[in-house]
Amino acid sequence: MKRLEEMPEILTAQQIANYLSISRRRVYELFQTKPECGGIPNFEVGKSKRVYKYDFTQWIENKIKEKSAQIVN
């Protein structure tokens, strides 16, 4: 698995799946979920979905903050 710093600026569902150790299908489910509801922000290139690495990094940081808040409460 590559470190996030080594990944390209625009990510595919497969790269995200590999990084998170989840299925590509689960990544597409997260793509279908609105970002404000916990989904991964994405955009289309033709029929393919892509994610800016910055948005993915922010999504991960938000998930960590949410988890920390749950533990505190």
Image (cartoon, rainbow, N blue to C red):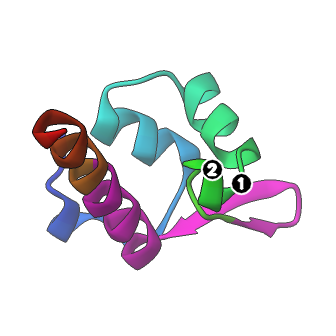
Query: At which x and y percent is residue 63?
Result: 32, 49
Give the labeled residue for mark 1.
Answer: 34
Quadrant assignment for the N terminus: top left
Q: Which residues are magenta?
A: 43-63
Is 39 or 5 nearer to us in this picture? 39
- Left or right for 45, reference 2: right
- Assign a secondary structure to mark 2: helix
Is 38 or 5 nearer to us in this picture? 38
Is 57 or 63 nearer to us in this picture? 63
Query: At which x and y percent is residue 10?
Result: 49, 72
The relative height of residue 71 versus residue 69 in the rendered view (above or below) is: above
Residue plotted at (57% across, 36% down):
27
The relative height of residue 25 versus residue 62 in the rendered view (above or below) is: above
What residue type is disc 1 on? Lys
- Assign a secondary structure to mark 1: loop
Residue plotted at (42% across, 45% down):
16
State whether residue 51 appears in this view: yes
Circle count: 2
State whether residue 9 appears in this view: no
What residue type is disc 2 on? Cys
Query: At which x and y percent is residue 8?
Result: 36, 71
> Which residue is at the far front?
73
Query: At which x and y percent is residue 53?
Result: 40, 71
In terms of image quadrants, where is residue 24? top right
Q: What is the C-alpha distance between the residues marked 2 and 1?
A: 5 Å
- Tag 2 and tag 1, C-beta contact below 8 Å: yes
- Left or right for 28, reference 21: right
Residue plotted at (87% across, 55% down):
47
Quadrant assignment for the C terminus: top left
Residue plotted at (16% across, 46% down):
68
Give the labeled residue for mark 2.
Answer: 37
